[in-house]
């Protein structure tokens, strides 16, 4: 079985002291992400002897019987380091850190009881630590299940500032590095919890450096436990990402994101880490020479941090991310200084089936429910927004949802249908199916984000007004029963599916729009530093070979400016820079193919931007700009359409050359503006008609 083979061989850890006087993310926030830490766990239950009707689980459960310790008490942490970790959380940190972070633990061998009659706030799990510690101090002696002492839980000195070096060793007097309380039946129920630095009182005479509390009503609370503990390594709530964010937190995107990340939780797809997480915390294999590492076609180690416009192109080999750490990060070109910078991460996930890592698989996959489609090996891609500052001041600033997944099946305008489904996968609940209205590669929704819509009809959006794109209703068919939001095989780029990310593909290789927002409010009101323009870039990432033993060969290139398929492009603003493809053109529309410039049905702003034929739009009309020096060619039988108020601007020194057989359709609300000496060559009759109707305008500037 995959779980019996090691994912990463243990390494001898030497914690290198950082003597720098500036903050460094690799030092961690409150805890070090390197070396070994051991966590002390206390289990508790509430006795509702004053309000028995408020007990959320009065009779207990099979996994955690009333009055007993949970069945999974020894499956959270290994008490000692093993060659191959067995316990869930210990294995998780071993795998995501490439063996650089060993998280051990043990529990006090006693179930603590909090009676309402004695503790009126007992049901409030958020304040449980102090009460449980008070009960624990009534025991005659400190006794863990595996015979450890308080000194075994004090491996790091307390007091290091956030982002500064942490010192291995014991405090005097001892201080537990982390005390964790897990309650069976409190207000935290399941999937809820919190963490913070500090102590809730002396436990057998010793304080703690950090602490947490969780509800474990339904199972071992893995998702929330690792999410909250990872705060202590990465940062505060502004580090929510990868399926661990909520609508009220200021974020780089209008929609709450799913995806995968250490800061993921109940809304994650993959449960493992991202390449960004590892870079942030400095988790690399020993002797890895670069910040981000990859291989060339001859399997030599090379720098995986790429700037293709500066010449970083070619053929690359990516081994499995989880076991090797290989990844590519590609800088998005043309973004102006003062706007959010973006990078595309490309990761090879071989998934649990091939790499044996229990968390390199989709959410709920381990339930073995046949309705859950299992993750398949392939390239998983995500866009990083800002968050490149690892050293210096304000490295713990910024906003949430800085990672946005690109799903290989495409980005779309999505909407709910009228079909209410019952008994849906995976837990038999009720949901409403959604459908794909049309492709929208530049500003549409992926299936791994919560789709915002005007639910209450007040002509304003809130980030909390969203639906989960769970069950897809395909055109003319019954809904697929497998939930898409938590990950589907066609979300990965693979040899048997989508293989190419480019200017012509869906999703696109271009940068993404950003809209920093939280709750009901846009932070920048559509201005800088948000990215309100999509810059077409000619980048192409192509999967060449998916080898049976795991590595994936891919090509990263520039100058891919030929469009060989129909495209619909929508965004507040789209800019075509003066790219130079193989034939010298910035863009070529192949013979017989159609380009539609239209207004996005997917919201890009929170305020209503207008209404067209009874449909409200939360996006402005699209402005498509062909920059000075850019050259565009439409081949015979192609088509260019401008719809729903879209405007095409030809800037001075640019050219748009349409074959005489190219169809040029500009609806009454749209227009083409030719600036200065820009050149527009098209069917003379078609241009004359457009000019007469005011849909073709010439400007002297």
Image: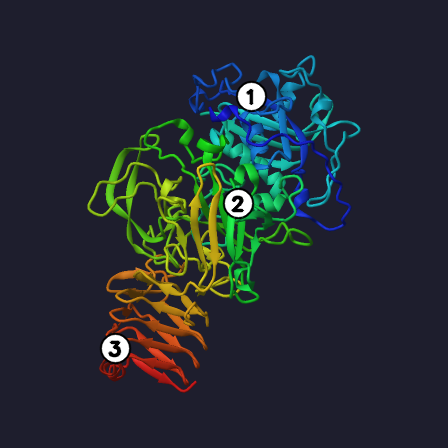
Inter-mark Cα distance, 3 to 2: 53 Å
- Which residue of the protein is positioned furthest toward the bottom in this rendering? 700
Look at discs 3 and 2 and give the one toward the viewer. Answer: 3
Residue neighbourhood size for the residue with mark 2, other residues' Cα within 10 Å, grouped as few (<14), some (14–19), many (≥20): many
Residue 70 or residue 26, whichever sits in front:
26
Image-based side of 524 in relation to 567, left or right: right
Please rate how many residues cluster around mark 3, counting C-alpha atoms within 10 Å: few if below 14, some from 14 to 19, many from 20.
some
* Coordinates of residue 693 in the picture (x, y in percent): 24, 81
Q: Secondary structure at mark 1?
A: strand
Name of the residue lying farthest toward the front:
298
Evaluate whether residue 426 shows in this view.
yes
Indicate whether 4 appears above or below 452.
Answer: above
Secondary structure of residue under mark 3: loop
Look at mark 3 in the image and give the residue it sits on: 660
Q: Is residue 44 left or right of residue 141?
A: left
- Viewer-side label of 1, 3: 3
Residue located beneath label 1 in the image:
44
Q: How is the image coloured?
A: rainbow
Asked which secondary structure carries label 2, the reply is loop
The mark nearer the N terminus, 1 or 3, is: 1
Front position in the image: 539 or 228: 539
Can residue 124 be seen here? no
Determine whether 455 is above or below 503 in the image.
above
* Residue 240, label in figure: 2
Count of marks, rendered view:
3
């Amino acid at each position: 079985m995959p779980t019996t083979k090691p994912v990463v061989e243990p390494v001898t850890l030497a914690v290198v002291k950082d003597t720098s006087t500036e903050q460094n993310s690799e030092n961690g926030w409150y805890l070090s992400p390197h070396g070994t830490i051991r966590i002390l766990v206390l289990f508790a239950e509430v006795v509702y002897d004053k309000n028995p009707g408020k007990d959320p689980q009065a009779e207990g459960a099979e996994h955690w019987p009333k009055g007993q310790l949970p069945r999974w008490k020894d499956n959270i942490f290994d008490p000692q380091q093993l060659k191959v970790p067995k316990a869930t959380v210990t294995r998780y940190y071993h795998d995501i850190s490439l063996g650089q972070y060993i998280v051990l633990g043990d529990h006090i061998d006693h179930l603590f009881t909090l009676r309402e009659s004695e503790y009126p706030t007992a049901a409030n799990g958020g304040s449980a630590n102090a009460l449980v510690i008070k009960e624990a101090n009534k025991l005659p002696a400190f006794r863990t299940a595996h015979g450890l002492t308080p000194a075994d839980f004090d491996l790091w000195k307390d007091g290091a500032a956030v982002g500064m070096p942490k010192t291995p060793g014991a405090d005097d007097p001892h201080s537990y590095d982390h005390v964790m309380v897990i309650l069976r039946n409190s207000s935290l129920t399941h999937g809820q919890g919190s963490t913070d630095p500090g102590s809730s009182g002396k436990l057998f005479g010793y304080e703690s450096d950090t602490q947490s509390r969780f509800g474990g009503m339904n199972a071992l609370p893995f998702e929330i436990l690792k999410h909250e503990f990872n705060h202590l390594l990465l940062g505060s709530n502004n580090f929510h990402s990868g399926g661990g964010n909520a609508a009220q937190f200021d974020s780089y995107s209008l929609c709450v994101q799913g995806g995968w990340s250490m800061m993921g939780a109940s809304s994650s797809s993959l449960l493992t880490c991202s390449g960004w997480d590892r870079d942030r915390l400095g988790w690399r294999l020993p002797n890895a020479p670069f910040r981000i590492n990859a291989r060339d076609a001859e399997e030599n180690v090379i720098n995986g941090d790429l700037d293709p416009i500066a010449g970083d192109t070619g053929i690359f080999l990516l081994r499995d991310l989880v076991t090797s750490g290989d990844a590519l990060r590609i800088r998005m070109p043309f973004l102006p200084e003062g706007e959010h910078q973006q990078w595309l991460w490309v990761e090879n996930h071989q998934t649990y089936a091939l790499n044996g890592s229990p968390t390199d698989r989709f959410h709920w996959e381990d339930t073995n429910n046949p309705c859950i489609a299992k993750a398949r090996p392939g390239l998983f891609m995500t866009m990083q927004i800002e968050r490149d500052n690892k050293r210096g001041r304000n490295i713990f600033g910024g906003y949430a949802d800085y990672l946005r997944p690109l799903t290989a099946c495409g980005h779309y305008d999505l909407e709910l249908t009228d079909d209410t489904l019952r008994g849906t996968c995976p837990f038999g609940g009720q949901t409403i199916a959604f459908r794909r209205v049309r492709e929208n590669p530049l500003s549409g929704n992926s299936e791994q984000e919560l789709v915002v819509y005007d639910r209450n009809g007040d002509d304003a959006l809130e980030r909390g007004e969203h639906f989960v794109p769970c069950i897809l209703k395909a055109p003319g068919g019954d809904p697929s029963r497998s939930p898409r939001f938590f990950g589907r095989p066609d979300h990965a780029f693979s040899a048997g599916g989508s293989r190419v990310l480019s200017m012509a593909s869906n999703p696109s290789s271009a940068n993404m729009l950003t809209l920093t927002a939280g709750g009901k409010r846009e932070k920048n009101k559509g201005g800088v530093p948000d990215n309100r323009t999509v810059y077409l870039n000619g980048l192409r990432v192509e999967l060449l070979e998916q080898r049976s033993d795991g590595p994936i060969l891919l090509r990263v290139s520039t100058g891919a400016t030929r469009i060989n398929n129909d495209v619909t492009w929508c965004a507040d603003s789209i800019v075509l820079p003066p790219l130079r493809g193989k034939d010298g053109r910035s863009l070529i529309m192949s013979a017989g193919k159609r380009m539609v410039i239209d207004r996005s049905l997917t919201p890009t702003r929170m305020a209503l931007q207008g209404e067209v034929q009874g449909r409200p739009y939360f996006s402005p009309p699209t402005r498509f700009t062909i920059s000075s020096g850019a050259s565009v060619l439409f081949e015979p039988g192609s088509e260019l359409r401008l719809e729903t108020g879209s405007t095409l601007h030809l800037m001075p020194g640019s050219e748009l050359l349409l074959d005489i057989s190219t169809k040029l359709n500009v609806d009454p609300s749209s227009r083409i503006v030719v600036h200065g000496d820009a050149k527009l060559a098209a069917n003379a009759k078609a241009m004359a008609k457009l000019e007469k109707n005011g849909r073709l305008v010439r400007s002297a500037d």
